Structure formats: C-alpha cells, structure tokens
C-alpha cells in the first residue's frame, strides 16, 4: 500500500483560483485551467498558431520551460497569464552571480512585461531539480538561484506582480505509510526543502509540485489502477477522519501535511503538471487519458479541492501538445502527453469547463506535407542484413514509441513495424526522397498504411521544414551499417 504514495517523477498541475495572501493585501487571481507548453519537437507549430489554440480553448494560463522570445512575443496582449521557466543548466550561473540573475530578469521578464504587455506572473526557477536521478547535482544551487532571481525581481520593481517558485517532483516528499498524515520531506533533502519553503513563504510565493498518478501505475504493476482515477476507488484510505479515494488527493495532501508539520500549513500550492499520456505504454491510451483528464477537470471545475485543502485548486495540465523529440529515458510514453497531437489536432473529447462543451478545438491554418508514406517494399527480403540496422537507425533518429506491447501500433507484424519505422524517419525528414532510401528495402507510396488505432502520420509543414528541404540527405551504405548523413 505504500506504493500508493509513490511519486517518482514528473508531474502535473492544477488550476483555477489561487488565493494568495501577501503584503497584507488579499490578491485574488481567478482563472481557469492552465497548460504546460513544451517545445521539444522536431516540428513546431508556430507560436501564433499555439496562442490561437490556447485562446480558442479558453486556456487562461501557460507554463513554459524557458523564456523563448518568439513565444513571449506571441503571448503579448493575449490576456493569458504566463509562468516563464529557467532550465536546470542555468542554475549554477544564476546561483553564483547576482548580475547574471539581474540580466536574466531584465531580458526575460522586465522587457516583456513593460514594453511587450506579456502578463508574466511567475518565474519557475529550475525544473524538478531534486529528482533522485540527478544525484543531487542541483541541490546546492537551486536556493541561491531562487534568492538571486527574487532579488533581481525586487530590484526591477516587479516583486509584487511576479512571484518565484520551483516546480518540484512529488518525490521531494513521501509518506512512511499510505496515509497523507505521515507525510514529510525526503530525508536527504529535508534541510534544503525547509529553507526553500521558508523563502517562498517569506516572499508570498507558491510551492509548485508535479503529480503523476500514471507514473505510480507505470512503476508498480500491482498498483490498483482505479485509484489513479477519480471514480471513487474503494476501499478508500481513511486518515484522521478524511477519506482518500484517488492518488491525486492523497499525494497532494501528503505535501500539505509535510508543510504543516514544519509550520507552513498555509503555503499556496500550485500543481505544476498533471496529466496522462496516450501512447507508448499499455496504460497510456486514449480512453485512459480521457478518463483521467476529464475526471480531473470535473474536480477542478467543482472548486472542491482536496480533503486537507478544500477550495479551488490551481493547476497546469501536462501537456498541451505532444513533443516528439523528448528524451524517452523515463519511458516511451514521454512523447505522448499532449491533449493535442503535434499537428494541433485534438486527441479526444475533453470538456475543460471553459464554456466550450463541444470538446477541444483544433489548430487552424496548419499545412501538412503531401499524402505520401515511406514503407517496406512488398518484394523486400526480410533476411537482408540491412533490415536491422536500417530500422535501428530510423527509430533512433525519428520516433518509434508507438510500437511495442500495448501501444497504438502494438498489433503490427514484423513488416508493419519496419514500415512504421521507415515512415517515421521519412516524415521527420520532411519527406525528402533521400530519407526513403533504405537499401533495397523501402519505397514511397500514396496509399495510407494506417489501420485501426495505428496511424502512419504525415508531418506538418514548418519553416524549419522548408529550410531542411534545401539541404540534402545522403544515405550511405557501408559494409556493417547504414549511415545517413545530413550535409
Ligand atoms: C532531438 O534532440 C536531440 C538533442 O536532444 C538532437 O540531437 C536530435 O537531432 C533531435 N532529433 C530530431 C529528429 O530532431
Ligand atoms: C533568457 O532566456 C533564454 C531562454 O531560456 C536564455 O537562452 C537566455 O540566456 C536568457 N537571457 C539571459 C540574459 O540570461
Ligand atoms: C547518477 O548516478 C548513477 C549511479 O552512480 C549514474 O549511473 C548516473 O549517470 C548519475 N546521473 C547523473 C545525472 O549524474
Ligand atoms: C515491433 O517492434 C516493437 C518495438 O521495437 C517490438 O516490441 C515488437 O516485438 C515488434 N513486433 C514484431 C511482430 O516484430
């Protein structure tokens, strides 16, 4: 049962009404659900297209992972509240140099707020810097970076409108039982966590945590799947007279108890990431993602909160759009967290409670490449010793995360698998002829090989795609391996 509380990675986010008390004023920022906007893609929709999607879908706030000026420009005067982010690899510099922090704030906050009309509300300092997998790399630099960014915001006169925070993975706290009331910070980082929490509290800033019930299920096959959703799992866990029938409540309130134990029971909490992936794992599929996100949105919109924190949540869904070039080190599902596919098409019906009951609204004005695919030649000999290296190469440089047990293309036979890999590589390389020259094995077809849940997708046209088209791709067949060289 202690597995119920397991939170290894990632995270999520919640929503709506954030009530913060600071400077003796009650600042009441009311808004709908937020979304995370990540950009680790081979082909990006233009920032203006994404901003239009945000507005069309009634999204009122976004969380970014950096401070890309093109994205911030597109958010100008959009009315959308923004959390900008500082990547972990900048923490060391910002921790050790106040001038660097001042420059960061000047360039990436002040400039956009004052002249550009971008409604920046938060600076996220680092992203899950205390993940166990980082081996403590960012332990010494996160707090000093946070302090320097806060000092820079104060110096820039922005400290009352822009708050700092640190999006943390839910593994910074744990419970020694399945009960939230046994929650406390992870022993190896208790000291730094308490310093950070005090600093946030002193500055009227929120605690941001990413919560992923999907990961509980992914890491522990015996985890009761229904407890991850919002359908009243029984038997509920009863803790100090409060009843827990879903992981989100239990996980969130474990944090509340940890904070309360150290005298910070009223610190505002933002759920920085919450969501469910749609592919790349047997539990990652459209029905589960819809069930989780719709269940979560119903909770969110109800304003009911959690047993320990009744009242509206504040959260950001993870994620708005798929990212096909994320590291798959955590798992193949990493590239499939979006509410929307890469091309801005919605994956399933979802009511975000923003007055648009008809589901998600697709991106407009997106052009796809031609309707053609690269597949295995029917006459190809599967014993050809180029098959294995060709598939390995294609998968390494494109995306094969929809292949494998329980995934959307998990029912393909060997030939189907090979075609899928070839096509993915061909599409990622903007359908260049030279990207469908797997020696003696591949051919281009205008007949869509998709069937059932398995979609052979066509890539979108982007500016970068146009640039890539002007380069040439050479496929070099060497004795032991296939090398594809971009020149
Ligand atoms: C994906 O990102 C890596 C860097 O993380 C880069 O080297 C690689 O070229 C990218 N792949 C594609 C297909 O864009
Ligand atoms: C502003 O943010 C961008 C994107 O995260 C980063 O590359 C750049 O170094 C930052 N500017 C300064 C002056 O630190
Ligand atoms: C963390 O430590 C493990 C084991 O010592 C090592 O394999 C891994 O590469 C380290 N990770 C980082 C990010 O340093
Ligand atoms: C297809 O590819 C996936 C991923 O590489 C693999 O797990 C699966 O066994 C393959 N299926 C067949 C029939 O070869």
Image (tube, grey):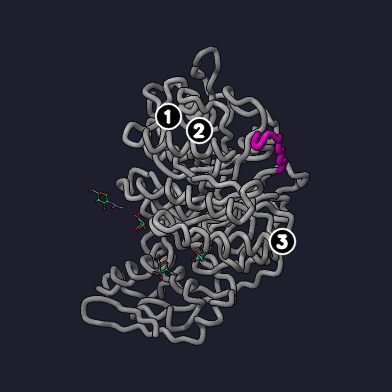
Q: Nearer the viewer, mark 3 or mark 1?
A: 3
Q: Residue at x 67, y 51 (%)?
A: 81
Q: Earlier in the sequence, mark 3 or mark 1?
A: 1
Q: Earlier in the sequence, mark 3 or mark 2?
A: 3
| Residue at disc 2, secondary structure | helix
Which mark, by number, is residue 5?
Answer: 1
Number of other residues with Cα within 10 Å of mark 1, as a class: few under 14, some 14 to 19, many 20 or more? many
Task: Report, in whole angstroms, how far the alpha carbon at label 1 lies from the one at label 2.
Answer: 11 Å
For the magenta stretch, what is the residue range?
A: 21-31
Q: Quadrant of the N terminus?
A: top left
Q: Residue furthest right?
A: 355
Q: Main secondary structure of the magenta part?
A: strand
Q: Residue furthest left?
A: 479
Residues at badges 1 and 2 in contact (C-beta under 8 Å)?
no
Q: Which residue is mark 2?
A: 228
Toward the viewer: 279 or 8? 8
């Amino acid at each position: 049962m202690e597995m119920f509380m397991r939170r290894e990675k990632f995270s999520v986010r919640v929503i709506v009404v954030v009530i913060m008390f600071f400077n003796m004023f009650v600042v009441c920022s009311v808004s709908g659900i937020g979304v995370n906007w990540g950009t680790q893609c081979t082909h990006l929709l233009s920032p203006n297209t994404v901003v239009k999607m945000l507005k069309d879908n009634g999204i009122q706030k976004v969380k970014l992972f950096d401070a890309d000026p093109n994205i911030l420009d597109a958010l100008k005067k959009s009315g959308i509240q923004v959390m900008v982010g500082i990547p972990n690899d900048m923490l060391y510099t910002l921790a050790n140099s106040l001038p660097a922090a001042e420059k960061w704030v000047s360039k990436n906050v002040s400039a956009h707020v004052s002249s550009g009309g971008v409604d920046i509300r938060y600076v996220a300092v680092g992203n899950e810097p205390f993940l166990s997998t980082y081996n403590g790399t960012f332990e010494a630099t996160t707090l000093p970076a946070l302090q320097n960014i806060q000092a820079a915001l104060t110096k820039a006169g922005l400290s009352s409108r822009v708050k700092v925070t640190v999006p943390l993975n839910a593994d910074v706290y744990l419970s020694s039982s399945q009960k939230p009331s046994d929650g406390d910070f992870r022993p190896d980082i208790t000291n730094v966590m308490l310093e950070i929490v005090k600093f946030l509290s002193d500055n009227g800033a929120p605690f941001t945590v990413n919560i992923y019930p999907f990961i509980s299920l992914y890491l522990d096959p015996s985890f009761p799947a229904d407890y991850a959703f919002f359908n009243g799992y029984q038997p509920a866990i009863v803790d100090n007279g409060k009843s827990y029938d879903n992981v989100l409540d239990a996980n969130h309130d474990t944090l509340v108890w940890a904070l309360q134990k150290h005298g910070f029971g009223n610190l505002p909490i933002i759920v920085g990431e919450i969501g469910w992936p749609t592919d790349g794992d047997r539990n990652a599929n459209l029905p589960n993602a819809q069930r989780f996100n719709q269940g979560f949105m119903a909770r969110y919109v109800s304003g009911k909160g959690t047993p320990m924190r009744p009242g509206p949540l504040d959260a950001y869904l993870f994620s708005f759009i798929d990212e096909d070039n994320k590291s798959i080190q955590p798992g193949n599902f990493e590239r499939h967290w979006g509410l929307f596919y890469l091309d801005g098409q919605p994956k399933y019906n979802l009511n975000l409670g923003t007055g648009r009951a008809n589901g998600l609204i697709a991106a407009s004005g997106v052009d796809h490449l031609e309707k053609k695919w690269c597949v295995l030649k029917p006459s190809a000999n599967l014993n050809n010793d180029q098959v294995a290296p060709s598939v390995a190469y294609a998968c390494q440089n494109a995306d094969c995360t929809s292949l494998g047990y329980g995934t959307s293309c998990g029912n393909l036979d060997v030939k189907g698998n090979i075609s899928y890999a070839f096509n993915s590589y061909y599409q990622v390389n903007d359908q260049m002829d030279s990207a469908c020259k797997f020696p003696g094995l591949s051919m281009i077809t205008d007949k869509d090989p998709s069937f059932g849940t398995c979609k052979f997708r066509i890539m979108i046209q982007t500016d970068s795609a146009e640039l890539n088209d002007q380069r040439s791709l050479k496929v070099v067949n060497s004795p032991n391996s296939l090398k594809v060289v971009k020149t």
